Amino acid sequence: MRIHLGHHFYGAGNLGDDLMLAGFLRVLGELEPGAEVTGAVPFDRAALAGRFPRITWHGMGREERRACIAACDAWLGLGGSPFQHAQSRWFIDHLTEEAALCRELGKPMHFLGVGVQEAGELGEPAVRALLAQAGGVWTRDAASARRIHASDAKVPAAAAADLAHAQLAAEPPPHAKPGSVAVVANFDYGDWPGRDALLDALEARSPARKIWLAQEARELPGAERAIHAALPEERRRGWELIGPDVPGTPLSSAMARWPGAELLVTSRYHAALTGAWAGSSVVVIVTNEKLRAAADELGVPRIGPAADAEEVARALAEARPVQAPRHLAAAAQRACAEWYAAARRAMAGRNPPLAQGTS
């Protein structure tokens, strides 16, 4: 099978995206070791090739993408929140163009490991058209599947799990180390009113090591590195900034540098998942529905960005080491197998609904 990955955010500097992509490639390697995969991105393709040599990376020119789609057997929208458009339409506009190419060239489309942040996303005409064209959607969490089912979207949808679980199950991060706390603080362009309440509570525990963990390699406004740099000097003192990811290096080396903390407080989705596989006690700062779903599926306490001292204390008291979520890894693997079977059927000109019981 020749697969073209239609999403174009790979290589942007987010370790979580790479974990998800690695999980997909791992399961695909079990399903069909000789499958060919292409992708088109606007980022450093040499660095991506160093990390994911199995994928042939191309640029974003329309004719170059058209050639990739023409040569593929199946177009796959892999990971992310592709239907959100509250802040920008860049992703929707890209997918609309990809869908037009798939229609022109007669290629089947599916979405795997994706999220729906808000039900309102599905009412956008462009999103409705994308879903009507897709042969199926496998979501990264049950809440996203429920939103699709509750809409009038004309697409089979199945609840699954994030594909990073498949990678983390096979190559888990270093186990949590006693006496350490880590914060993964990302608020995009939003505020963090509860910053001092949380940091005061963590520092009151007198940890042996205080880690300011950056899942994102870039220095973006409102992301981990920018927030750390903006801390008052007396507040920043003692917080060790660690960015485990070095673009272009093997993913295993980034995971080896993951500083497994006894307690991890995060507003990053994949940091929560990685912390769970490390056996950390995890608290999720919920800034969107993706993070809410992660907290619920991992069974960990959650707080809001404006949580006060009492709310923080309650969440920290409730936090317990997370058991490896092997059921989520199994769900991710099952979704990959179901997508693969659906793509094979589409290649043969048959495209029945998703198997019963998968929704």
Image (cartoon, rainbow, N blue to C red):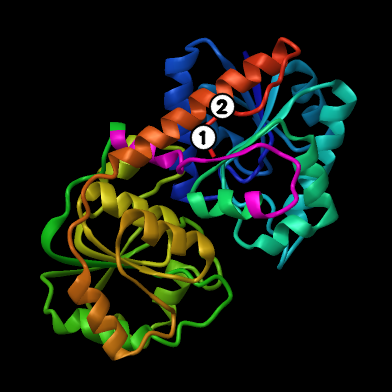
Expressed as whole percent of the image width and height from the top left, the position of residue 276 reads 28, 52
Q: Can I make out residue 51 in this image?
A: no
Q: Which mark is residue 159?
A: none
Q: Quadrant of residue 255?
A: top left
Expressed as whole percent of the image width and height from the top left, the position of residue 184 reads 36, 66
Name which residue type carries label 1: Thr
Residue of label 2: 355
In-image side of 45 versus 206 (left or right): right
As displayed, is residue 63 above or below residue 190? above
The residue depicted at 71 percent of the width and 67 percent of the height is 86
Residue of label 1: 358
Residues drawn in magenta? 149-169
- Which of 70 and 100 lies nearest the eye of the viewer? 100
Q: Can I make out residue 280 in this image?
A: yes
Q: Quadrant of the C terminus?
A: top right
Name which residue type carries label 2: Ala
CB under 8 Å between discs 2 and 1: yes
The residue depicted at 52 percent of the width and 55 percent of the height is 143
Cα–Cα span, label 2 and label 1: 6 Å
Residue 168 colored in magenta in the image: yes
As displayed, is residue 37 above or below residue 249? above
User: Few, some or many C-alpha atoms within 10 Å of disc 2 (few <14, some 14-19, many ≥20)?
Assistant: few
Q: Secondary structure at mark 2?
A: loop
Q: Quadrant of the N terminus?
A: top right
As displayed, is residue 185 above or below residue 78? below
